[in-house]
Image (spheres, grey):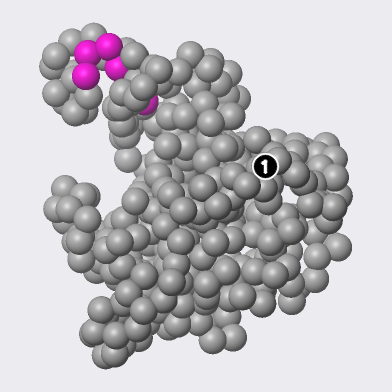
């Protein structure tokens, strides 16, 4: 990938990511997502003798130094962890400047700086059990730039129901699979609901299509919202405790990430906050961060498909690490959990 003269990037030194401006042109050979997928497929035929998928690593068996090194492994490219993979081509300031043309055309100045602050907060929490207070502290860091917009980050969502329309994808004529619908209905406590789009008026209101669904995130008072989040945190750690392999732990971590995405604990910025904890938990349990192409898919995909997205993102991280941190890559290259699917 070639970085243009005058392009702005981020650098990492001792766990600190800083924004800098480069004035020279450098060319680095990197793998595209398509190349990563093709390159990783060759590993499916045989399993490395050093595969550790049957090893149960606990928080206490992974050193603080190891967690820190893996967490900051991408160095100046860590911004990829908070930018959707589909938007990497626009660089680290894509959301600050709305270079991707999304978000209704609205710029979000301060996005990257807030996420760097959130990365640092999560780094300080590695090895510590996730709590409700920790979640909202991370949310406050990730959304600190929105204070000037009148938002109040770091507190439970207080607005009326928020909703999104399910898109239509191949194999799912109603925009969401039956399995995903069943999973949403079975969630306890109930944090969102599916409403069929049966009228053109509703379709236009939420920019959906007749035959699809409206996913509505339910409104709760602050105490109930915190209690709901605590319930899912407890369920998550129960699943981890009953996990006997690395793959089972990754499944539990993916499940909790999806639960956060479906409950919208904060006013805004829930996807980016859930992503922070997704990578915190992966690193704490002997894996490494994942790079997601479309984080919002966690709301709509069924569990198996979302877990596969997380596994695929591990391959993207490892490939990126091969370029920007070869020494760390050597310690990651023997573990290819995405090849287990």
Q: Which quadrant is the N terminus positioned in?
A: bottom left
Q: Toward which corner of the image does residue 297 lie, by quadrant?
A: top left
Q: Which quadrant is the C terminus positioned in?
A: top right
Q: Which residues are magenta?
A: 209-215
**How many labels were placed on the picture?**
1
Residue at the image point whose x is 20% and y is 61% from the top: 99
Residue at the image point whose x is 80% and y is 59% from the top: 59
- Is residue 241 visible from the viewing direction of this image? no
Q: Say which of 267 and 46 sits in front.
A: 46
Q: Is residue 213 magenta?
A: yes
Outermost residue on the top side: it is 198
Up-down: is 208 above or below 64? above
Residue at the image point whose x is 34% and y is 14% from the top: 173
Up-down: is 170 above or below 295? above
Q: Which residue is mark 1?
A: 44
- Give residue 296's position: percent from left, percent from top: 40, 41
Residue at the image point whose x is 60% and y is 41% from the top: 254
- Give residue 41's position: percent from left, percent from top: 59, 45
Q: Say which of 76 and 200 sits in front.
A: 76
- Is residue 16 visible from the viewing direction of this image? yes
Residue density around tag 1, few if under 14, some if 14–19, many if 20 or more, within 10 Å: few
Up-down: is 184 above or below 287? above
Mark 1: which secondary structure? loop
Up-down: is 295 above or below 76? above
Q: Say which of 180 and 328 sits in front.
A: 328
- Give residue 277's position: percent from left, percent from top: 57, 54
- Give residue 295's position: percent from left, percent from top: 43, 45
């Amino acid at each position: 990938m070639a970085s243009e003269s005058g392009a702005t990037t981020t650098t990492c030194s001792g766990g600190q990511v800083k924004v800098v401006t480069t004035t020279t042109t450098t060319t680095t050979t990197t793998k595209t997502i398509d190349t990563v997928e093709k390159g990783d497929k060759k590993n499916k035929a045989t399993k490395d003798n050093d595969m550790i998928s049957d090893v149960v690593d606990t928080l206490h068996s992974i050193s603080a130094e190891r967690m820190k090194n893996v967490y900051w492994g991408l160095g100046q490219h860590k911004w990829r962890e908070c930018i959707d993979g589909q938007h990497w081509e626009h660089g680290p300031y894509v959301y600050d400047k709305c270079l991707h043309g999304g978000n209704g055309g609205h710029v979000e100045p301060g996005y990257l700086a807030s996420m760097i602050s959130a990365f640092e907060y999560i780094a300080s929490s590695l090895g510590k059990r996730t709590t409700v207070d920790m979640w909202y502290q991370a949310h406050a860091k990730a959304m600190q730039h929105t204070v000037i917009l009148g938002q109040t980050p770091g507190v439970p969502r207080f607005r009326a129901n928020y909703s999104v329309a399910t898109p239509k994808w191949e194999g799912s004529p109603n925009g969401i699979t039956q399995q995903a619908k069943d999973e949403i209905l079975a969630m306890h406590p109930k944090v969102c609901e599916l409403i069929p789009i049966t009228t053109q008026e509703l379709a236009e209101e939420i920019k959906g299509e007749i035959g699809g669904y409206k996913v509505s995130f339910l409104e709760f008072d602050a105490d109930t919202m915190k209690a709901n989040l605590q319930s899912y945190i407890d369920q998550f750690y129960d699943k981890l405790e009953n996990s006997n392999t690395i793959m089972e732990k990754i499944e539990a971590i993916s499940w909790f990430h999806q639960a956060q995405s479906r409950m919208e604990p904060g006013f805004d910025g829930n996807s980016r906050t859930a992503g922070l904890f997704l990578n915190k938990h992966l690193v704490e349990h002997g894996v490494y961060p994942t790079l997601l192409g479309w984080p919002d898919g966690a709301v709509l995909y069924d569990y198996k498909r979302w877990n596969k997205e997380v596994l695929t993102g591990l391959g993207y991280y490892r490939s990126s690490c091969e370029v920007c941190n070869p020494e760390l890559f050597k310690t990651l290259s023997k573990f290819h959990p995405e090849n287990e699917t």
